[in-house]
Image (cartoon, rainbow, N blue to C red):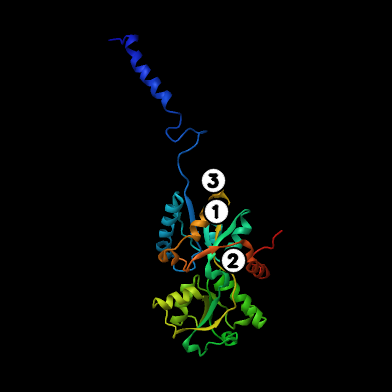
Amino acid sequence: MNRVAPTALIPALLVIAIVASGCPEGGATGGADGPSSETPTLRFSAIPDQNTTELQEKFDPVAAYLAETLAVPVEYVPSTDYQGSVEMFKNGDIHLAWFGGLTGVQARAAVEGAHAIAKGEEDAEFYSYFVAHRDSGLERSDAFPAGLAGLTFTFGSESSTSGRLMPEAFLLEHTGKAPKDFFEKQPGFSGSHDKTAELVESGQFQAGVLNYAVYEKRVAAGKTDPDVCRVIWKTPAYADYNFTAHPDLEELFGAGFTEKLAAALIGMTDEKLLGAFPRKRLIAATDAEFEGVRKVAESLGMVRAPK
């Protein structure tokens, strides 16, 4: 059997030593205790107040805009329902969300340090439309439509500000009754504004309530016939949709990142991008602007009073 001379092993051992000294433990991204070169991904979502398949198509370009503007990876994460988006935010699975007034209040109550940073220009004075099928016999009026009591009626999502919370509050204010006592038949929940419009226009429900922006966009796109699904009452104004930022953003992307994110959102000017909301433009927002929504939600038992 041939033996290798000890001196023949020296060059190979030198090569191994050089390679080992030049490559820290854990590879190119650093060891277990060293910094990682991998950039975290900013994940955001939106309450599924419209058809969820369409939301993915609408918000992916928003993600691309934010990624280019902020120079960080950005991903839109779809949510199955309103409370699902709040839970993702609460758990830190998403760092930013386009919430309704109520879900924004709920998310900020659940995550200390979370704040509203942007809203639509229209969201300072948002409102809902009560709609009814033309066969109901109800016509548009400035007075609350008491004739709704005898009709089948659907709200949107159970956690929707414009499709449930504020309409329920106005109904209580004008009639002195909660929905379960006002309507002769138990009202339904369609799950989204689009679905509410579709159910009323098809006659599956005689009446319903939805956010005015979705209704008007559907009419403009020819998706809803305003002569069939008719607006019968416009609610008073209230604060609604907003972008709420998670406090983890500062830890993940550095101090001052939330302010940069707010500037990127407010600086969005592309009509196609703004159409995802849909809004004419985004402006700055503060938590205090949604205090009225919080108080209504508290009175209806939909959010806990602050400690």
Q: Secondary structure at mark 1?
A: helix
Of the image marks 3 and 2, the number of the one nearer the N terminus: 2
User: Within 10 Å of the Cα at label 2, are there few (<14), some (14-19), or many (20+) other Cα atoms?
Assistant: many
Q: Which residue is mark 1?
A: 259
Q: Position of residue 292 (x, y in %)?
A: 65, 69
Q: Position of residue 93 (x, y in %)?
A: 52, 52
Q: Looking at the image, do the residues carrying marks 1 and 2 touch, with CB atoms under 8 Å apart?
A: no
Q: Position of residue 277 (x, y in %)?
A: 47, 66
Residue in the image at 56% along x and 77% along y: 187
Going by the numbered disc 2, the residue's amino acid type is Leu
Asked whether 286 or 199 is in front, the reply is 286
Going by the numbered disc 3, the residue's amino acid type is Gly
Q: Which residue is mark 3?
A: 254
Marks 1 and 2, Cα distance to the nearest angstrom?
Answer: 23 Å
Of the image marks 3 and 1, the number of the one nearer the N terminus: 3
The disc at residue 66 is none
Q: Position of residue 198 (x, y in %)?
A: 44, 77
Q: Secondary structure at mark 3?
A: loop
Quadrant showing the N terminus: top left
Q: Which residue is mark 2?
A: 102
Going by the numbered disc 1, the residue's amino acid type is Glu
> In the displayed structure, does residue 162 sit left or right of residue 77?
right
